Amino acid sequence: MEAMRTQSLSLRPVQLSDAALLQELFLKSPGYFALIGMEPPGLEDVIRDLHTLEKDPRRRAFLLFLEREAVGYLDYKLHYPEAEEATLSLLLIREDRQGQGLGQRALRHLMENLVGVKRLYAVVYGQNPRAKDFFLKEGFRHVKDGGPAVSWYVRTLRAGPDEGLL
Ligand code: ACO
């Protein structure tokens, strides 16, 4: 039945030429920026951030597509804080697409594809109970609060084929 078909979700590395697309995604997700006490970034800010991102080989940023539609963004840093660890700084699903299982699918997809990464951290900014619930539900545990507005979560990832299951 066509209505039951699972639409395909894919991740594509963000390029400088995606700045306008990315900014539109942010503009369509005002709730998140209100939550962290910021205005959604302007185009200039997005372009600057993409330049900064390009300079750090450990940073990885992806646009998330549902079929051909950009519905999310994901940004993490490899080999951080330690060599075999990675830190997710933002998973954002476009506001009108939240609560439909896309965040969960995107995070699971990422975790399955982070080859060689033993632990994944998630840094949650601001008062964001929804994000905290989301990460707890996905098997993360709370590690520490780094000041009033930042909370760290972590989970172990499945080990690589040579290492067996931890
Ligand atoms: N209220 C509380 N919990 C919710 C809600 C809600 N409205 N919607 C979803 N969840 C929880 C549920 O527990 C759900 O599990 P279920 O299967 O029992 O319903 C689980 O999250 C997964 O739901 P998804 O539909 O996959 O969540 P979604 O696609 O909305 O993605 C996310 C979650 C990423 C937090 C999304 O809502 C979002 O982009 N929010 C704004 C940006 C943000 O805060 N991102 C996280 C920042 S911190 C970081 O990225 C490290």
Image: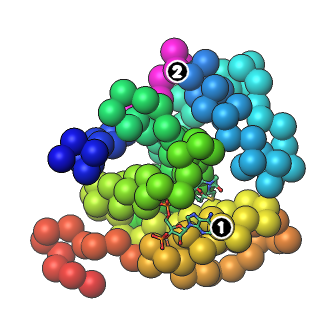
CB of mark 2 near ligand 1 (< 8 Å): no
For image coordinates 53% across by 58% down, the residue present is: 99
Q: Is residue 144 above or below residue 110?
A: below
| Residue 50 visible, this orientation | no
Q: Dividing the picture into quarters, in which one does residue 62 lie?
A: top left
Residue 18's label in the rendered image is: 2
Left or right: where 150 falls relative to 57: right
Mark 1 vs 2: CB contact within 8 A? no
- Residue at far left of view: 162
| Disc 1 crowd, CA 10 A, few/some/many (<14, 14-19, 20+) | few
The span picked out in magenta is: 12-18
Indicate yes or no whether the magenta region holds residue 15: yes
SS at badge 1: helix
Residue 100 pos. (x, y %): 47, 55
Indicate yes or no whether the magenta region holds residue 120: no
Mark in the foreground, 1 or 2: 1
Residue 147's label in the rendered image is: none
For image coordinates 67% across by 34% down, the residue present is: 28
The residue type indicated by label 1 comes to Arg
| Disc 2 crowd, CA 10 A, few/some/many (<14, 14-19, 20+) | some
Residue 27 pos. (x, y %): 70, 31
Of pointers 1 and 2, the one earlier in the residue sequence:
2
What is the distance, in whole Å, between disc 1 and disc 2 at their CAs?
Answer: 28 Å
Left or right: where 50 falls relative to 12: right
SS at badge 2: helix
In this figure, which residue is indicated by the disc labeled 1? 130
Left or right: where 33 falls relative to 7: right
CB of mark 1 near ligand 1 (< 8 Å): yes
